[in-house]
Image (cartoon, helix red, strand yellow):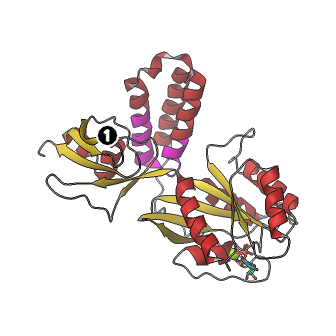
Amino acid sequence: MTTHTKLKWYRYNIARRIRNLEGDDLIQELEDIIEDIRNKKLDKIGLFKIQIRELEELIAETKKKPKVKGRTYDPFDIPASGDGRIALFGISNVGKSTLMNAITNTNVKTGAFLHTTREALAGTCEYENVKIQIIDLPGFLDFKEDWNISRQIRRVARTSDAVMMVIDLSMDIDRQYDFLIEQLEEAKIIIDGETTYKLGIIATKGDLPDSSEKYQYLQKITSLDVFPTSVKNEESLEKLKENLFKFLDVVRIYTKPPQKKADFEKPFVLPKGYTIKDMLKKIHTSFIERFRYARVWRPSSEIQGQSVGIDYELADTDIVELILHRS
Ligand SMILES: Nc1nc2c(ncn2[C@@H]2O[C@H](COP(=O)(O)OP(=O)(O)OP(=O)(O)O)[C@@H](O)[C@H]2O)c(=O)[nH]1
Ligand SMILES: [Mg+2]
């Protein structure tokens, strides 16, 4: 990997790690990132020196910010829950809420009129023990400029791990696609044609006339993944859930107490590329100090009970046994 690619990968990961953090949690994470860069001896490289300086500035800024007490109610401020957040980003009436009802545990209002959804709503989509938080947003009204709600939609989208553009296959594709890309630029989710977000397209109403031609056209004009759906086709919804899970790019880790079987019901869900240390942090930070080593089993590979250190990178469906010092 060249230094540039490495830095790009790092920046992507940093953005992802700090996206929903604030206050002391943000400072702690930023300090950990700097320590990680130093441990990997990357801090000797010019580009990374600049990166460290930026992170230190962010720490200083965060320390200066007054702590927010007793916030006023904000219908667009949804607490994060589950293993990853995906926002549905589309113009009005394309079927976002109908889709949300079909793939999550919610039953939100839908309608054949414009602007049915007025605020951000959350639901959980479960796929193989991974809980994906889906945020249904109000739709944009693309004929109305500078609308306050558009700003709120963009704000919530920025707090997500992945943004799904929702495009109606029964309407004009170019008009929707161009408008949404503009909004993503406005939201700084796309900057200079690049993004640190996971970005994809859900194509809706695949049961309506001409939808397959429009789906093919959409695939031609974009390099993003397009997932076709129709709420009338159960199979397309199951496939969508599977694709959303893959899209989040997370790994499921099963922990195993010594001499016992692993718990396959409640995996730890971490972004791909995360290590044992990240997992320990998720359990409790004190576990990092108490860590001695771990044993890892990786089904379908030769890794069977191998002893590994704290920086070991985990893969999907790994089984991990932690060996800790007594507290
Ligand atoms: N034929 C067909 N109609 C659909 C499908 N999905 C949604 N619809 C219809 O499209 C219309 C709009 O659906 P909503 O889910 O309310 O759209 P929305 O994107 O949430 O709209 P806003 O909340 O205004 O942004 C409704 O009449 C739905 O019944 C689909 O897969 N096929
Ligand atoms: Mg809606």
214 in relation to 224, above or below: below
* Magenta highlight range: 14-33
In the figure, residue 265 lies in which quadrant?
bottom left
Q: What amino acid is at disc 1? A: Glu
Q: Main secondary structure of the magenta part?
A: helix
**Residue 72 visible at all:** yes
Residue 121 image point, x, y percent = 59, 72
Quadrant of the rendered image containing residue 30: top left
Residue drawn at x 54%, y 55% is: 246
Q: Where is residue 244, by image quadrant? A: bottom right
Tell which quarter ligand 1 is in. bottom right
Q: Is residue 189 above or below residue 203?
A: above
Residue 260: in magenta span: no
Residue assigned mark 1? 302
Crowd rating for badge 1 (residues with CA inside 10 Å; few <14, some 14–19, many 20+):
few
Give the side of residue 120 with respect to residue 215, left or right. left
Under circle 1, the secondary element is loop
Image vertical order of residue 281 relative to residue 128, above or below:
above
> Which residue is painted at 30% across and 46% down in the image?
280
Residue at 52% in and 65% down: 133
The residue located at (52%, 50%) in the rendering is 249
Q: Give the percent coordinates (x, y) of residue 230.
A: 70, 74
